[in-house]
Amino acid sequence: MGSTKFFEWFTVVKACATCKIFHAEAASLPTPPLPAFRIEEAPPFYHSGCDFTGPIRYKKDSGEVGKGYILLFTCAVTRAVHLELTTDLSTVEVLGALQKFINRFPSVRTITSDNGLSFQRASKELKLIYENVKNGEIKKQLSDLMISWKFIVPMAPNFGAFYERQVQTIKRPLRKILGSAVPHFRDLEIILSGIEVMVNSRPITTVASGADNIEALSPADLLFGYRGRTVIPEHSSKPREAADAGKIIFSKRWKYQQRILSSYWKRYHDEYLQCLKTAHKQTPVAARPLKVDDVCLLQGESYNRAFWPLCRVISFPENTPPEKARSCTIKTAKGQVLHRPIHKLYPLEA
């Protein structure tokens, strides 16, 4: 093909509306600075994130098998985690787990999560509690303790990366270790409490070369000033006034829990440290930023772009220039106004 024919072919392709749809590239997502709540000095879990992981099978007292879920809370500053086991994804379970979490860490003030229905309802329930308090003095005290629930942009789980990363860190090793095993609900709670200690003892900094700093800093150091323990000391006394059968049952269940925790620690240690060896680098992408009135394809569930809807960019977050925006408000051809992340939009060249 000669240069003249190639130029003619390129001109035709560039002007073709169908070709534009199938050749469009996703808008580049700028690398943002860490938000202020991630780096400011604050009490443990003052700024928290939460998400569900599961399901995990457990054995009921009746012998039936049920499905449980882990509600994970992550401190945005210290990277510490707190795990609560729930029987389902309902709002009642979320509020119950939240109450236990706040009882342990009363400094909680903000919670960030995805737009799950149970989280949205829990947020509304908290607002109703604060609004229905009539006593002036109590209402003033509650206003100082009010929890603000923040939701990330829909269809953008990467906006909650600080807690999503912890979900993957805990879920993958646990699923591999449990396999087809079905522990009792109580055993699973004990196992999760041990996993919580392990994860909070992980290194979050590099080891300094000086002789005075020989250990990497961990979330447990920031929470309590010391590393946690995951096993009962060997010199601890046995249960008193217990029948031989009771001792055997206690011994078997305790060994079962410790065996799972030991296996979890080995796999978690190997996989987590392996991830730390690779430095996370983001190469800046040279691309034209979106601007108001740009016509884009909105990425849908179908792999075929022919079924993706067209939309128009109508605004960006307040006080955020377009080249630094990570989300925007769009309007579809059907008149829907949606808030979506930048990387879900594929701008069509004019």
Image (tube, helix red, strand yellow):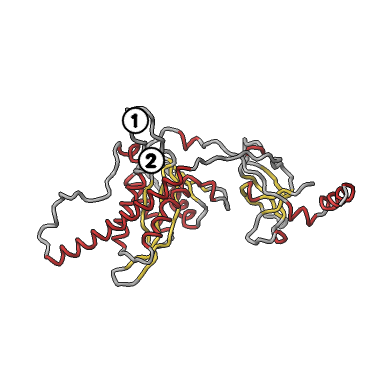
Residue at 80 percent of width and 55 percent of height = 17
Where's residue 216, x and y in %?
A: 36, 36
Where's residue 291, x and y in %?
A: 71, 41
Mark toward the start of the polypeptide (1 vs 2): 2
Left of 68 or right of it: where is 226? left
Q: Kindly identify which residue carries mark 1.
A: 213
Crowd class of label 2 (few under 14; some 14 to 19; many from 20; radius 10 Å): some
Q: Kindly identify which residue carries mark 2.
A: 203
Query: From the viewer's perspective, is residue 222 above or below residue 328?
Result: above
Q: Under tag 2, what secondary structure? A: loop
Left of 69 or right of it: where is 11? right
Q: Under tag 1, what secondary structure? A: loop
Where's residue 120, x and y in %?
A: 49, 54
The answer to which quarter of the image holds residue 261 is bottom left
Residue at 61 percent of width and 42 percent of height = 326
- Point out the residue furthest to the right here: 4
Where's residue 85, x and y in %?
A: 36, 57
Left of 221 or right of it: where is 241? left
Left of 11 or right of it: where is 98? left
Mark 2: amino acid: Pro
The answer to which quarter of the image holds residue 309 is bottom right
Q: In this orientation, which residue lies closer to the viewer: 166 or 37? A: 166
Mark 1: amino acid: Asn
- Point out the residue furthest to the left here: 241
Q: In this orientation, which residue lies closer to the viewer: 227 or 110? A: 227
Query: From the viewer's perspective, is residue 98 above or below residue 136?
Result: below
- The label shown at residue 273 is none
The answer to which quarter of the image holds residue 254 is bottom left
